Image (cartoon, helix red, strand yellow):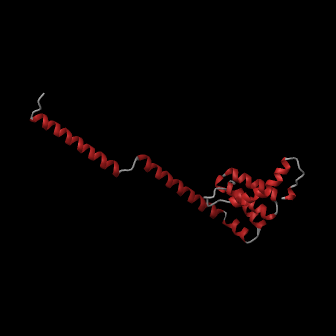
Amino acid sequence: MKLDRQDYASLGGLVLCLLGLLVILLTQGAARPAPGDAEGGQARLEKHLAAQSRLTMLEQLYAPVLQLQDAGRVSEALLTLTDLQKRFSPAPYSELLKGELLLLSGARDQAVVTIAQAVRGSGDLIDEKSPLSRRLLVQGLVDEGLPYYKQRAAGGNASARDL
């Protein structure tokens, strides 16, 4: 089979069309991000902004309690926190503050129970990367209480006063 001038022209046109299509596909793909990437970035941004607004809200809401705690007025801080918990539903962060205040006032057993409930409610409270983290406080309570609970589990006569 012999190719004539028209066959060469048709093949040349076909090759040019394919090259043009290839160039268009390559340049459009590089200029526009994949749909999943854009949506993922948007979701991360929304999540970050929600976390920031939550942190700001918690700081503003519990500022009076933290100020009283810093001033050493623990009983007043507990009363203020109780009032806030009545007006707003108790959040894990407020339970953690209550546990800290109970610990400062000497009610260790109640403090441990309250802090444990708070940590169960929100893992952010022991996450090292979280601005709400109280990991060192919780770790200290665990380290202090572990021998007591081990002895108690083994059938020993450990008392809560040994803590």
Q: Residue at x 46, y 52 (%)?
A: 41
Q: Nearer the viewer, residue 41 or 58?
A: 41
**Is residue 115 found left or right of 45 in the rendered image?**
right
Q: Residue at x 45, y 49 (%)?
A: 39
Residue 123, above or below 19: below
**Is residue 2 found left or right of 41 in the rendered image?**
left
Residue 1, image quadrant: top left
Q: Indicate the position of residue 145 as horizontal and vertical percent values.
A: 80, 56
In the rendered picture of this protein, how many numbered marks are placed on residues?
0
Q: Indicate the position of residue 120 as horizontal and vertical percent values.
A: 70, 50
Residue 162 visible in this rendered orientation of the protein: yes
Q: Nearer the viewer, residue 17 or 62?
A: 17
**Is residue 151 found left or right of 126 in the rendered image?**
right
For the C terminus, the quadrant is: bottom right
Residue 81, image quadrant: bottom right
Q: Indicate the position of residue 104 as horizontal and vertical percent values.
A: 78, 64
Q: Residue at x 24, y 41 (%)?
A: 18
Q: Residue at x 30, y 45 (%)?
A: 25
Q: Nearer the viewer, residue 8 or 133?
A: 8
Toward the top, the furthest residue is 1
Residue 43, above or below 136: above
Toward the right, the furthest residue is 157
Q: Indicate the position of residue 88 as horizontal and vertical percent values.
A: 67, 56
